[in-house]
Image: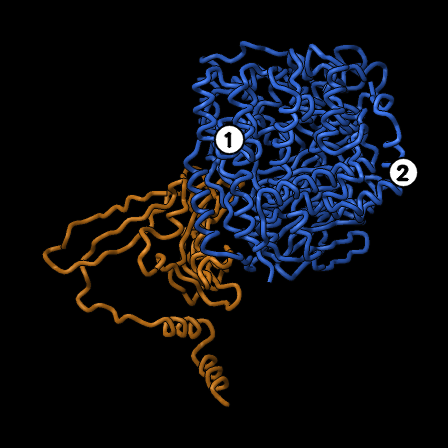
Amino acid sequence: MNTQVRRIGGAAVNGRATKIVKEIKVDINKCTGCRACEMACSAFHAKPKYSSINPARSRIRVVVDELNDEYVPIRAGDYTPSECNGRHIYTIDGKQYSECSFCGACCPSRDYFIEPDSGLPLKCDMCENVPPLAEPMCVQVCEADALTYLEREVEREETPQEKRGQMEVGLESLINQYGIEAVMDSLNRMSKP
Amino acid sequence: MRYAETGFDLEIDLSLGSIERVASEPDLAEYYLGGQGAAAKILFERVPPETDPFSPDNLLIFGTGLLHATPAPAANRTVVNTFSPQTNLMSHSLFGGFFGPELKHAGYDRIIIRGKAPDLVYLYINNDTIEIRDATHLRGKGCAETGDMLKKELNDYKIQVAAIGLAGENRVYMATIDHNHASAARGVGVIMGDKRLKAIAVRGTKDVNIARPAEMFELCQSLHRKMGGSSGCGDWMAVDEDDSFHHNHFAWGNSRTRIKDYWSPELQRRWTDWKYDHMDRQTGCYNCPKKCRNVISWPGRPRFAYKCFGKDTYHMAAFLELDFSYEILGVAQEYGVDSYSTPQVMAFALELLEAGILSDNDFPGMPSDTRGRFFYLLEKIVRREGIGDILANGTWHAARQIGKGAEAYEHNTTKKFEQLPIKLGKLNPAYFLMIATGEKMSITQIEGSFPQDPLPTKEQREEFVGKWEAVPDEKFKKYFLEWEKRSDMSDDRTFDIVDWNEAMHYIDDSLGLCGFVSSFRGQFGGDIAYHMNNIPQVISLATGMEMDKEKLWKAFQRIRTLVRAVNVRRGLRRKDERPPEDHWAVRDEEYEQMLLTKYYEFKGWNSEGIPTRKTLDRLDLGYAADDLEERGLLAAVESVPVKTAVAV
């Protein structure tokens, strides 16, 4: 665990407004494969908080292949509706990694980061919380220091993106997965008395 | 809703091909916790004592610990119980890793396997989908290789696999059950092989519920941080390269020779280079911050991992150096043999050859160099070829099958099971009792809470007890403060110490906790994460059961006494409770027998080591007392005066 939050960058870039970008740095050579991050993530995001444990609901996963000595923690990124067509194999320090080992996307070609009950995609929220956590849960429990948290100050975009509600994000995921017509049909059916 | 446990067992009959999901008894956890405790209850009730270990009626139980899949750190040791053909007693083993928590997430507290499949099968568990599948394509495959093949063919790298290798398939008594880089030793792989079960592949995506979530998570995170930061937890040999402890004090060859000044700075440098030049990384088990397993790639050999003494057993048996262990371990682990007992069996065979009891004709084609010989013997044993067919039964049985005086060379077993190769001078009463009465078959599975040796000065002892949180009772601090010489401990205090040591193992093995952060590790430094003063709270928060120190201690006594009852029914008696005759050079038969008698009384057992009706009733084991009485085991012995019952 690293309790020291590292900030990179100055107060403001070219005198313009800046924002803090949260990042989790992964050192795959330090990972012991213990999956404490998965346990803690699933506990934190359970409702009520900590009431159940289920690594299958975790937004971080350690991709492990013991025979190949592959231990890669990956965090859930955005959903991609189509399968990736780049199937590359990388050799790093004599070990072979597939591209999937590093990709945080939730996609139709594998079942990482899919909520086991609903089939909806999961996405890392850097543990949004009130009050804010000093560090995301997975970083807090990583005693091996394979995960470290850092905040980076970057120039703010001219037109900040409209913040979308949870419902809108959820609906978009459903539309991506099932198509807008199927979602509309379901909504129509459900709204009938 | 149940908390921490799922409330369901999987019942598999491999003869019938049947699969049932059965609700477990609601109060099973309250009385027997889980893991070994629950398995002892099931074995007592369902396997009649006449059952041959190779009978289809023998059960093979894979149990999760009560705390598996909760936030409790280092709760990941899967418990395997059955009856062993080597000892004819209850076989108890554990393996670390990820299997137990995954099984719980699939919705089951344990898998109970009976019957025998007609040919090699594997069990596939994916939440509610459970299938017995053909495994003939996995015949002869290595343990980790099997896991890898199953993950590939099932197209899911998140599956956890426990498998046997060639040794298990061929019913070698030393066969292990392996799960990635973890291994269950002490006679369980042979039964998995006998049932023609090559592997179990499990995947689970269900929630495990916690009774008091926020408090549980907070307490567990503080324990997790403590473990991570404390050198008193985990395997210190993963980071300390000085292993003079094993090499200067343990015996080499067929548990024969001590080399007291073996270790040297030059050797340490050389061996450290071997390790770090070939180590990929150190890994941990599920939700544990320690990294006890050293993962090694040795040129031309399968990748393997070891912890603690596991790296020393082969080269010490062969009078070679660490590079030999590194060379053979990957091969031996893929075959799936116990690295504690197997090298002893090999060294035993070579001693018999040297003594002329076995001849060159028994070892056709064996190379002349030691390395070659060990590899040769490994192949013979795992294939049960030629002399290997006899050696595969362990030293006790092999010696009797070979005859011609071979029995004298089988000198390091208790209850027919190979012990650690330790040969010392003066009798140590606590160790006498632990080796004699332990039913987990290895000293490492009973020692561990009270330090092995006193500290030299009063100031050091005071400092030690000042930080000692783990003591279940303040009296242990007094014992330690007043302890100056190893041999200088009253019998009554020895009994308390042995009982506490044993208690922690029975608790760990029922909760699924790792001994390296609990039962085994306290003897070295005292600074462990789990102990009698905080485990009750962890259980309460996880399960919602009311638990306190007294109740937990009683649960230990109940489970431990039930295991004794299980084994007594199968013939275990006082005469079997003997450490190897040469464990200490100086022995005192009369004192030892007096010690045993008094310790039996302390435990509430009669002079034959059989729990009395009073003890069984007090521990809610009236059903066991009824059974022992019906079999004439209680009444018959209790009427025999103590003196005549003493075995000499």
Q: Secondary structure at mark 1?
A: loop
- In the rendering, which numbered label is found on residue B488? none
Q: How is the image coloured?
A: by chain
Residue farthest toward the left in the current orientation of the protein: A15
Q: Secondary structure at mark 2?
A: loop
Instruction: Residue B470: give x, y in percent of width and height.
Output: 52, 34
Instruction: Residue A13: give x, y in percent of width and height.
Output: 14, 55
Q: Earlier in the sequence, mark 2 or mark 1?
A: 1
Position of residue B131 relative to residue B405, above or below, is: below
* Left or right: B321, with A120 as reference point: right
> Can you tell which quarter of the image residue A94 is in?
top left
Q: Which marked residue is nearer to the observer: mark 2 or mark 1? A: 2
- Depth check, front residue: B197 or A55: A55
Q: Residue at x 65, y 45 (%)?
A: B35
> Can you tell which quarter of the image residue B407 is in?
top right
Q: Residues within 10 Å of mark 2 (few under 14, many from 20)?
A: few
Q: Residue at x 52, y 52 (%)?
A: B541
* The colour assigned to chain A within the rendered structure: orange
Mark 2–mark 1 Cα distance, whole angstroms, equals 46 Å
Position of residue B613 relative to residue A177, above or below, is: above
Instruction: Residue B567: give x, y in percent of width and height.
Output: 78, 36
Q: Which residue is identified by label 1?
A: B235
Instruction: Residue A111: give x, y in percent of width and height.
Output: 50, 60
Position of residue B229 relative to residue B414, above or below, is: below
Colour blue maps to chain: B
Q: Residue at x 56, y 42 (%)?
A: B97
Q: Residues within 10 Å of mark 1 (few under 14, many from 20)?
A: some
Q: Which residue is identified by label 2?
A: B632
* Left or right: B370, with B47 as reference point: left
Does the rendering let one see residue B305? no
Position of residue B225 relative to residue B1, above or below, is: above
